[in-house]
Amino acid sequence: MADRDEVQGKLCDIDHRRPAVVRVTVIENGQRRTLNVCREHYAELRARQASPFESLFSGFGGGFRDDLLGGFFDEGGAGEAPLDAGGMGEAPVGGARRARGDGGTSAPRRAGGRGRGAGPARESVDLTDYMSDQAEEILQAAARTAAEWGSREVDSEHLLFALADNDVVQAILGRFKLSPDELKRQVQEVSPKRERKGARPEGGIGVSPRVKAALLAAFNASRDMGHSYLGPEHLLIGLAAEEGLASDLLRRYGLTPEALRQQTVRVVGKGAEEGRVEGKSETPNLDKVSRDLTALAKQGKLDPVIGRAQEIETVIEILSRRKKNNPVLIGEPGVGKTAIVEGLAQRMLAGEVPEPLRGKRVVELIVTSLVAGTQYRGQFEERVKQLLEEISAQQDNLILFIDELHTIVGAGATGGEGGLDIANAFKPMLARGELHLIGATTLNEYQKHVEKDAALERRFQPVLVSEPTVEQTIIILQGLRDVLEAHHKVTILEEAIVAAAELSDRYIRGRYLPDKAIDIIDQAAARVRLRSTSRPVDLVEADAALQQVKRERDYAR
């Protein structure tokens, strides 16, 4: 997403008449390109945008995304390229879909994916990179089943019904003495009869929060088992791990997630990574006081990053420089500075960075952990010395990230004026170019602490991170919708997303978008989930009052 100042004053690149309000990224002839889009075209795009998870079911009925853009670019001749929406369930920028094979379970997608869909650029793990042909066919079959039964969304029972026809799943079921036909019959019996109308519902098929959670659980199961693909066997484990009709039915026959993992290993074998013994870490001391963002990105544990493509590109440019190649992100709390670094880690994992940055680890140093327990000057100096030796030895493979960069000034100093602190320890390495460092702090703290230290300040290249607009925040919330729905097991409506962005901007002061809007959606979803699984507060209080009356009556006897 562009900064406000970069978009303001520009015309929409589609019709060349209306003022632009938001910037999106497109792929044209395999090249990344940014477009400034007006409010009207943005609204049209948002109305037609499908969920990243829904795009996984795109083979049904001509595809959820058939004619998705429908000549969206015809007016201004901006090209035929689809807007890049590389998030969870969608392809990263610049990739090409591999040729379809014979549907083998062990045939994952080549990194790069398909690049289908519409929306702003995302940085996240791409499920389609790992989805086998058989798994995708099953998802499309589940969408057909949902439509035939008159459901407006694909739910866990539809996915389980489709899985029962797969050879690998049938082999796993056989180890539990459960026939596929019996499983399908049970699914049909427990599925809500009211949904079966025999016709495809108008408006297309959505994806339930339970299925989204199951897809994430399936991906994690694949990673845990050391497999390099996401196949039908992992979808079965994912269904068993999440609540719903499918999970209840599977557990009735003893098909728990752990039992399914054991039988899956017997049927398809272990992955190459599962049995591999982890070698000795090259940075054991750094590992104790840090968080490996690249490893978290590989495990799919980082949220998708939407709308910060421009800032990520700027960070990559600075890191690629020969001199003064240490960016510092400066912006108000909650505008997404840390998310930019997480997006960088995800992009590096996908190989979408220049050659000098490929293969590097992005590691977040936890300053408080480094200082903790060092009561005396010698303890801190020894710990810093060991840390610097490891960093120096791994300088070609490591990018260090320090959130709240200003905290390193004076951190660990015990001897008064001139005492050693982390900033002073890092200065020589920064001067020699032995340390790639990304910092993040607020403008006030940067001016107060970093700018005053001229030797430290000249080692960094500032990158200003502005607060996103309400329109940009809506796009960010749409990108996080799948993750939040999967976590809370609720459906988040488009109206709720728009209201969260607009009302938080209007009424919440002292905080910044998108953080305050994300918090509102997160809290609202948690509250809805709580109300659906617990008794109302009034009932709890009434019950407590009743128990008190009973205790008083017993004491009176």
Image: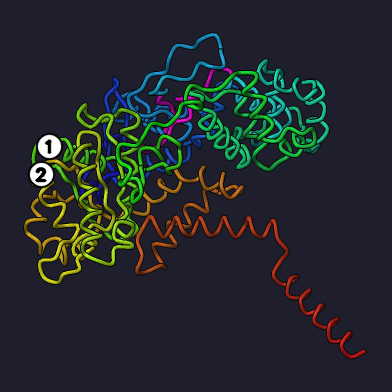
Residue 494 seen by the camera: yes
Q: Which residue is mark 2?
A: 324
> Where residue 209 appears, x then y in whole percent?
60, 42
Q: Main secondary structure of the magenta part?
A: loop
Q: CA distance from mark 2 to mark 1?
A: 7 Å
Q: Quadrant of residue 326?
A: top left
- Up/down of 334 relative to 210, above or below: below
Could you tell me the amino acid type at mark 1? Arg
> Residue 301: image x %, image y %?
45, 42
Instruction: Answer whether residue 66 is visible to the viewer in this image.
Output: no
User: What's drawn in magenta, residue-wise?
Assistant: 114-134
| Image quarter of the C terminus | bottom right
Locate residue 173: give its quadrant. top right
Q: Kindly state the secondary structure of the residue where label 2 is placed.
A: loop
Q: Secondary structure at mark 1?
A: loop
Q: Residue 306: x and y, percent?
A: 37, 43
Viewer-proximal residue among 210 and 225: 225
Instruction: Tell me the residue that label 1 is attached to.
Output: 321
263 vs 516, left or right, is right
